[in-house]
Image (tube, grey):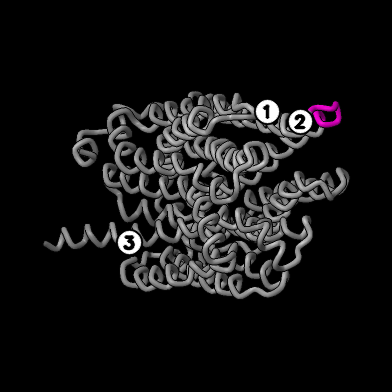
């Protein structure tokens, strides 16, 4: 009976972690649909409106690495609960915002809380479920939340904005966050921590936070069009210099924030490169597909949100019910390779969607195929990124993996948006009809996204060893069943 109770508590603790991850993922996309309403109510300029998204992303991505290390030093539970508290209170500030400054400040605080909580979630899941079979199922649930949450955010954002107003896009976090915080205090176990004396490397923390924040800021501005190429190049150079100084610092520091030895592991390095590529394609595709539906096919915000429904449904089905069994039987590498092929194929098919596209013929099937690909690929690649590190570096690896996800999303959005805009502007200047020019721009961006995914397939093939027959044994096969 005690063993059964402990098992139930572990799965309940996983639910708390996934609820927080879902809130974080939703908050990255749920605001997108509400932006026009926010712009009208608070009188944002087009350039100023971008800060509603960018202030969150910059704080989030910039602090992930430091947050992961704090998880090792202070314990995952403390850092997670602290992040959840900051995120929930910041959501209240955003929901009560009556000025541009109040909303942007609240969004930055949300990003800080999201970084603290999200950076340690993966390491806590790995420690909660050390047995391979249960771990695969737990990672399937987490991956469903991560991959499906973005699409669900577009759906939820449209429904909430239409029914209750944009303030509730943020206020909905309050009851959910409060309940999850209470459950987390009770269910999450305190872990042995290294202690602050083990070293947080303050200089390294400043360098990496400043470098990542400036880098994400620079990338986010490339598709805005109100900064000169010279400015962007200058910002990019400074960001690279800061990150290079961080690497030099880590090589020489007695107690580094990021132990560079982690990159000697080909598995960890290769898996994180694939994470960057997959999230670059996935996040950029969702943003541009929403624009295709609205600006080419004429969908409103609610129709756009509902149009994405096949993707999270398929991701959820695959991640929750099939991913663990397939991973146990065939190994993460084969599942990952299959998932990447499906995701790339879906993007290639979407690139052929016409100006007068039919949803059930041109859109829904591609979302189904992409959902299948994400449902297979995301759990497998995250498991590979986390499985090769020592317990002492679990928080660091978790922060690194989340940084790879956010960096990939930021880079993918900037690159694909720039490709689409450049192609559309060129065609429009040649006299091509506006709707056709827009469609062709999005089609080219979808092709580039497919190339990123197939590049991830190549990295997987070359860098990740086939563990089938080595790491997969009869025990996890039995557990998966």
Q: Earlier in the sequence, mark 1 or mark 3?
A: 3
Place residue 63 in its image quadrant: bottom right
Task: Please report the residue visible at 49 percent of the width from the left and 67 percent of the height from the top.
Answer: 172
Task: Please report the residue visible at 39 percent of the width from the left and 57 percent of the height from the top.
Answer: 124
Q: Nearer the viewer, mark 1 or mark 3?
A: 1
Q: Earlier in the sequence, mark 2 or mark 1?
A: 2
Task: Please report the residue visible at 59 percent of the width from the left and 57 percent of the height from the top.
Answer: 31
Q: Which residue is mark 2?
A: 423
Q: Which mark is residue 13?
A: 3
**Residue 38, position in %: x, y?**
67, 63
* Vertical arrangement, residue 454 with respect to residue 201, above or below: above
Q: For the residues marked 1 and 3, what is the alpha-carbon distance in whole angstroms?
A: 43 Å
- Residue 431 part of the magenta-drawn span: yes
**Residue 448, position in %: x, y?**
64, 29
**Residue 299, position in %: x, y?**
60, 43
- Residue 229 part of the magenta-drawn span: no
Instruction: Read off the magenta span.
Output: 426-432
Q: Which residue is mark 1?
A: 444
Check the picture and name the quadrant holding the C terminus.
top left
As helix, strand or loop, the secondary structure at mark 1 comes to helix
């Amino acid at each position: 009976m005690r063993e059964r109770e402990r098992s139930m508590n572990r799965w309940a603790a996983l639910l708390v972690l996934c609820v927080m991850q879902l809130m974080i993922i939703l908050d990255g996309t749920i605001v997108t649909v509400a932006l026009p309403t926010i712009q009208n109510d608070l009188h944002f300029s087009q350039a100023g409106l971008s800060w509603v998204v960018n202030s969150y992303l910059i704080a989030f991505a910039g602090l992930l690495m430091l947050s992961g290390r704090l998880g090792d030093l202070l314990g995952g539970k403390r850092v997670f609960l602290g992040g959840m508290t900051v995120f929930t209170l910041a959501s209240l500030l955003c929901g009560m915002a009556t000025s541009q400054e109040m909303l942007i400040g609240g969004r930055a605080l949300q990003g800080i809380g999201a970084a603290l909580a999200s950076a340690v979630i993966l390491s806590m899941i790995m420690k909660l479920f050390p047995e391979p079979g249960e771990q695969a199922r737990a990672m399937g649930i987490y991956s469903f939340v991560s991959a499906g949450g973005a699409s669900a955010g577009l759906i939820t954002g449209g429904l909430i904005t239409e029914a209750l107003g944009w303030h509730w896009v943020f206020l909905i976090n309050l009851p959910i966050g409060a309940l999850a915080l209470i459950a987390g205090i009770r269910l999450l176990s305190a872990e042995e921590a290294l202690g602050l004396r083990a070293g947080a490397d303050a200089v390294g923390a400043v360098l990496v936070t400043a470098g990542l924040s400036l880098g994400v800021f620079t990338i986010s501005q490339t598709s805005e069009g109100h900064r000169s190429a010279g400015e962007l190049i200058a910002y990019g150079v400074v960001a690279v210099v800061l990150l290079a100084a961080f690497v030099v610092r880590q090589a020489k520091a007695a107690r580094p924030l990021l132990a560079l030895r982690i990159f000697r592991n080909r598995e960890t390095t290769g898996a994180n490169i694939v994470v960057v590529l997959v999230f670059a394609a996935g996040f950029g595709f969702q943003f541009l597909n929403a624009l295709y539906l609205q600006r080419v096919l004429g969908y409103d915000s609610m129709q756009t949100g509902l149009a994405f429904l096949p993707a999270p449904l398929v991701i959820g089905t695959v991640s929750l019910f099939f991913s663990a069994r397939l991973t146990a039987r065939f190994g993460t590498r084969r599942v990952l390779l299959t998932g990447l092929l499906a995701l790339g194929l879906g993007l290639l098919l979407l690139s052929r969607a016409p100006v007068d596209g039919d949803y059930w013929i041109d859109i829904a099937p591609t979302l189904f195929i992409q959902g299948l690909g994400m449902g297979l690929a995301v759990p497998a690649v995250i498991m590979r990124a986390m499985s090769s590190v020592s317990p002492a570096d679990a928080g660091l690896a978790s922060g690194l993996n989340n940084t790879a996800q956010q960096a990939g999303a930021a880079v993918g959005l900037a690159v694909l948006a720039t490709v689409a805009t450049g192609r559309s502007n060129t065609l429009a200047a040649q006299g091509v009809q506006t709707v056709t020019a827009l469609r062709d721009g999005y089609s080219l961006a979808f092709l580039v996204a497919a190339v990123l995914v197939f590049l991830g397939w190549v990295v997987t093939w070359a860098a990740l060893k086939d563990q089938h027959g080595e790491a997969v044994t009869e025990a996890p096969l039995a557990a998966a069943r």
